[in-house]
Amino acid sequence: MNDFLIFHWLKEVNHWGKTPEGGISRLAFSQEDKGARKYVIDLMEEYGMEVRIDEAANIIGKYAGTEPDLPAVVIGSHLDSVPSGGKYDGVLGVLSGLEVVRHLAQNNIRGRHSLEVIVFSNEEGCRYPYTLFGSSVMMGDFHKPWEEIKNMQDEQGIKLVQEIKELGGKPEKLFLARRNPEQIKAFLELHIEQGLVLEDKGVSIGIVEGISAPIRFVLKLMGSADHAGATPMVLRRDPLMGASEIMLALERIVKETSVTAVGTVGQINVSPGAVNIIPGTVTLSFDIRDIDLAARNQIVRNLEKVIREVCQTRDLKYDFQEIFNISPVMLDTQMISLIEQVCQEMEIPAIKMISGAAHDAMVMANHVPTGMIFVPSVAGISHNPSEYTRNEDIMKGVEVLGQTVLRLIK
Ligand code: GLV
Ligand code: MN
Ligand code: MN
């Protein structure tokens, strides 16, 4: 595979959602996402794939094997991005799958097993909070009640069900998207590392052994919106001051509990939000992750205790709502060995590592043998317009993916 179209495709697809800062805002099911999806569907068809959209609006492109009844080998990732994200997160995994298919098609190579490339819908969960939506629906791990799904809307009031329908999905029949794991021989995802480990070690390939997992919740703190001049300090019920204590406690608890844990408050909404009003309500988002589930649970328990104490001391009311919760996973040891063997044969240095970020692979790994290939993120930067991965590293990643696929489809 010594010619690559992936760089051209990356440029083209990233016209969708390009921001003035050079980053990408391609929120799930937005106009930008729709444009990128269309671009990828056209490419799939150009290289002889049979394309279908499932009930969750996942795009499934199939490059048929010579024995179509055998379980498929699947490559998958996502096209949606975070607000003001980068040009590689997710999209690289989709396009590297297409690069492998293009190589097979142009060289007239067909394995016994079919090869599928899947674009999972709404991986990021930024516009609608159902993170890892497409893969979870596909593997039967999405259990939100219909009452909630049907009313789910974004900040502009646009309904999730309307967007899914517009893309050819059937939100009222999500259960039909469920795949039998026996129909999938293996799942592979190539992704940027989004951290500093590969850069630090100076190697181009990471073989993921396990994926750390987030729990996310929204905390609403309610006090009393009063006059900023007329209300003495001792008489205030200020939820933003309470939030500050809670956030600093989060940082302390995470650091004390586990070296692999991380905790983030990424969103704060202060209401009414004026210079001369003490806030009446503050809403905070929490994202807490670890590869060690027991430690992560401990952090959440300790944090809840702090929230109760702070609210009691400051006479605040609170509402604590879990919005996402997935357990860490270890990936399949045979897939890890296979990728390792491919790297050795190709004389490409590789290291085994843990993923701090979440991926569709973590859903798939609970059901089918799953492997993940990482390529370096320069300076470890991701979810940021400066996200960058060198072309030579991408080429190595695609080669490793391609060679792994060749061994699996034959
Ligand atoms: C996905 O990018 C996540 O790890 O939040
Ligand atoms: Mn991401
Ligand atoms: Mn991603």
Image (cartoon, rainbow, N blue to C red):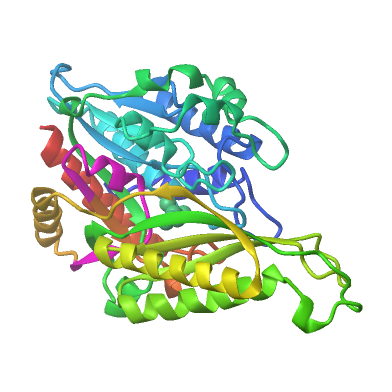
Residue 364 belongs to magenta span = yes
Q: In the current view of this chain or complex, which residue is farthest to the right? A: 230
Q: Is residue 320 above or below residue 157?
A: below
Image vertical order of residue 354 relative to residue 233, above or below: above
Give the percent coordinates (x, y) of residue 281: 71, 60
**Residue at 48% in and 72% down:** 306
Q: Which residues are magenta?
A: 349-371
Residue 237 location in percent, x, y? 73, 71
Drawn side of residue 155 relative to residue 82, left or right: right
| Drawn side of residue 214 relative to residue 42, left or right | left
- In-front residue for pair 408/302: 302
**Numbered marks: total:** 0
Residue 344 sits in which quadrant? Answer: bottom left
Q: Nearer the viewer, residue 1 or 15?
A: 15
Q: Residue 257 versus residue 80: which sits nearer the camera?
A: 257
Rendered residue at 30%/43% (across/down):
363
Q: Is residue 305 magenta?
A: no
Q: Is residue 186 above or below residue 265?
A: above
Percent x, y of residue 207: 21, 60
Residue 230 quadrant: bottom right
Q: Is residue 170 visible?
A: no
